[in-house]
Structures are given as C-alpha cells and as structure tokens.
Image (tube, rainbow, N blue to C red):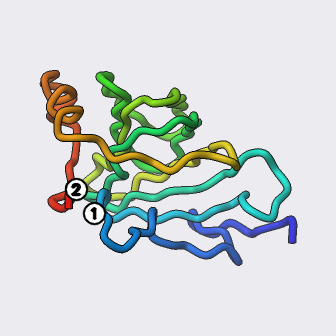
Amino acid sequence: MPFYKHNNYVWEGIPKVDYKPCDPGQPQTFSATDRQTLVGPGNDTAFHLRYFECAVGGYSSLEKHQHVHVVVCMRGHGTVVVDNEVYQVEPYDLVVIPPWAKHQLINTSDTEPFGFFCTVDGDRDRYQALTHEEVDEMCKDPAVKAALRIHEHYWG
C-alpha cells in the first residue's frame, strides 16, 4: 500500500520496533529508542527512510560506518555528536553525517521524545561500535565528553 496514515509520530500499518536488534553475544549500545522503517526493503528504492524516537533519557548507538546518514529532526530537542562536533538540534534542523564519522543522537528533553527521520542507502554496511581508544580520543574534548552517552554494557 503506498499510503500510511500518520498519528502522533506513528505510521499506521508500519511496525514500531527496537532501534537496533542486538545480535546474540553483542553488547547493548543504545537506550530507550525505537524505529519505524517507513521506506525500506520491498519499496524498490535505492534508499531507506526510517523514523527514530528516543524517549526521555534515550540515545542511539555511538557508532561509525561507511554509509552517509541524512537526519532531519522532527520532534523535541536533542544533541547530535559527529566526531568532535556537538550540535543542539530542534525540529526541522538537518544534519548530514559523513562516512566513517563517529556519531550519536541523544534526547536532551526532560519532558518529551526526540524524534528524527534518517535516510540511508538501501544497500549499506553494518554499524561498528567504537573501541575504548576511539571513545577516549573523543572524550579529550570536554563538550563531546559531556554530551556522549555510553551504555553500561557497550563493550559487553
């Protein structure tokens, strides 16, 4: 069906799932975040469009990969860390995350979800968690260190 009715940041007929399924034996890398794949496998497109929502206190994985992300913030307020840059974002702000950039999206609101659209290549690589050394290097910048959220089981 080519039409999906929107109701309070949920599209009817499109399942809302955990942000990232954890493979057996893989560490948890995010908190309180879910996703809806609005355009994805089966849509005959070269891209996928997903809607993510971080609940209060929620955040995405701190990760890197070869493909580009195009993020459009839609709801609430958040922080987007891209390498050693920290951006405070609100609805309709746009962030382009380049290949291999270390990045994380964090809800900074105490009262509402932080929601954003994310467009990526349909054919893409899997994410890579960062090493201790990569995180230590990022944390040399006090603003980045203050912004990052590292799940207690990030490294297993």
Q: Is residue 71 above or below residue 127?
A: above
Q: Amino acid at mark 2?
A: Tyr
Residue 76: x percent and y percent?
42, 49
Q: Give the residue at mark 1.
A: 27
Q: Residues within 10 Å of mark 1 (few under 14, many from 20)?
A: some
Residue 91: x percent and y percent?
50, 40
Q: Is residue 7 above or below residue 140?
A: below
Q: Tell me which residue sits at (52%, 29%) in the image.
A: 99
Quarter of the image where the N terminus is located: bottom right
Residue 114: x percent and y percent?
41, 52
Quick one: SS at disc 1? loop
Q: Give the residue at mark 2.
A: 154
Residue that sits furthest to the front in the current view: 25
Quick one: SS at disc 2? loop
Q: Is residue 89 left or right of residue 95?
A: left
Q: Amino acid at mark 1?
A: Pro
Q: Residues within 10 Å of mark 2 (few under 14, many from 20)?
A: some
Disc number at residue 54? none
